[in-house]
């Protein structure tokens, strides 16, 4: 901001945080002024000088301008995320209509887009996450062999972990200054992944899990009998080995007792 021909001040170039309003005062008088609002204090604003920015919340803000024993109350309606420079001109005089001579200059427009518009966005994101996660888990479970279903599901969750790591790297380590550029990068990565998945799906040979289960259910009875016999033989062999090991242990104990 440039006032007159010699005084130049730096304006705020970013939206205030948490929806507050960035307010500052310019003192055009030849004497110092003290400006306060509630518990916030702009401090003493010297003559022909600018105060610091203070974050003032939304609502009807009442600024108290003091000089010695005199006081002027100036009221300004504030929204969300705006920035104002309140100029106290050299013609300012304390009195009943003192606030009328103060000139507000809008440095930054207030927020005009309501936060409630985030609700449908989060709804669509949640809906997409639920649909994608459930179908992915069902696909990995149905296409996996009977003895590898848990492993395939763990692999599916591992891909989610890798995706979160990529988001962390891009969000924290990337040098993108603008948030829109970060969103464009994520959208581009998703587009690349969609193309890769489309190619993989085109060449994938789908396995019908019901058909596989039916094949296992229709095993030849002779093969079933062989499997039962092999299991029995393995159990008997295990018992025999255990008996032999117990008998050898008893013999060893008897020898030690005789000695």
Image (tube, rainbow, N blue to C red):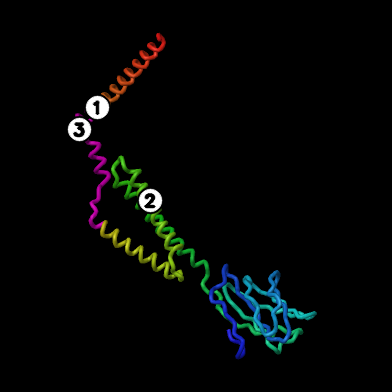
Residue 84, given in percent of the width and then of the height, sits at 61, 79
Query: Image quarter for residue 28?
Result: bottom right
Q: Is residue 150 left or right of residue 106?
A: left
Mark 2 burial class by Cα count in 10 Å: few <14, some 14-19, many 20+: few
Report the Cα–Cα distance between label 1 and label 3.
Answer: 16 Å
Going from N to C along the chain, the mark reached first, 1 or 2, is: 2
Indicate the secondary structure of the residue bearing disc 2: helix
Indicate the secondary structure of the residue bearing disc 3: loop
* Residue at horizontal 39 percent and vertical 57 percent from the top: 163
* Residue at horizontal 34 percent and vertical 16 percent from the top: 248
Read off the magenta span. 201-229
Query: Image quarter for residue 203?
Result: bottom left
Report the Cα–Cα distance between label 1 and label 2.
Answer: 38 Å
Who is closer to the viewer here, 24 or 150? 24
Q: Which residue is mark 1?
A: 230
Residue 130, given in percent of the width and then of the height, sits at 41, 55
Going from N to C along the chain, the mark reached first, 3 or 2, is: 2
Q: Which residue is mark 2?
A: 158
Which quadrant is the C terminus positioned in? top left
Going from N to C along the chain, the mark reached first, 1 or 3, is: 3
Residue 158, given in percent of the width and then of the height, sits at 38, 50
Vertically, is 128 above or below 234? below
Who is closer to the viewer here, 211 or 198? 198
Find the residue positioned furthest to the top.
Answer: 258
Q: Which residue is mark 3?
A: 220
Vertically, is 152 above or below 15? above
Vertically, is 114 above or below 8? above
Which quadrant is the N terminus positioned in? bottom right
Whether 227 is among the magenta residues is yes
């Amino acid at each position: 901001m440039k006032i007159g021909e010699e005084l130049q001040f730096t304006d705020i170039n970013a939206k205030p945080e948490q929806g507050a309003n960035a307010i500052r005062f310019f003192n055009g008088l030849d004497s110092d002024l003290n400006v306060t609002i509630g518990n916030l204090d702009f401090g003493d604003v010297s003559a022909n000088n600018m105060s610091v920015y203070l974050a003032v919340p939304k609502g009807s803000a009442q600024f108290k301008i003091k000089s010695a024993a005199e006081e002027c109350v100036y009221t300004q309606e504030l929204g969300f995320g705006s920035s104002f420079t309140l100029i106290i001109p050299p013609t300012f005089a304390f009195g009943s209509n003192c606030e009328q001579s103060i000139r507000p200059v809008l440095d930054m427009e207030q927020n005009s887009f309501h936060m409630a518009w985030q609700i449908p966005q989060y709804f669509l994101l949640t809906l997409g996450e639920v649909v994608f996660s459930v179908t992915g888990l069902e696909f990995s479970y149905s296409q996996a062999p009977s003895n590898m279903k848990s492993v395939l599901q763990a692999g599916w969750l591992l891909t989610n972990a890798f995706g979160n790591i990529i988001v962390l790297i891009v969000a924290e380590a990337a040098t993108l200054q603008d948030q829109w550029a970060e969103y464009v990068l994520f959208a581009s990565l998703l587009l690349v992944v969609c193309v890769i998945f489309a190619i993989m799906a085109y060449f994938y040979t789908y396995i019908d899990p019901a058909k596989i289960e039916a094949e296992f259910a229709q095993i030849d009875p002779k093969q079933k009998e062989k499997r039962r016999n092999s299991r029995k033989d393995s159990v008997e062999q295990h018992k025999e080995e255990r008996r032999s090991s117990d008998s050898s242990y008893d013999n060893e104990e008897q020898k030690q007792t005789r000695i």
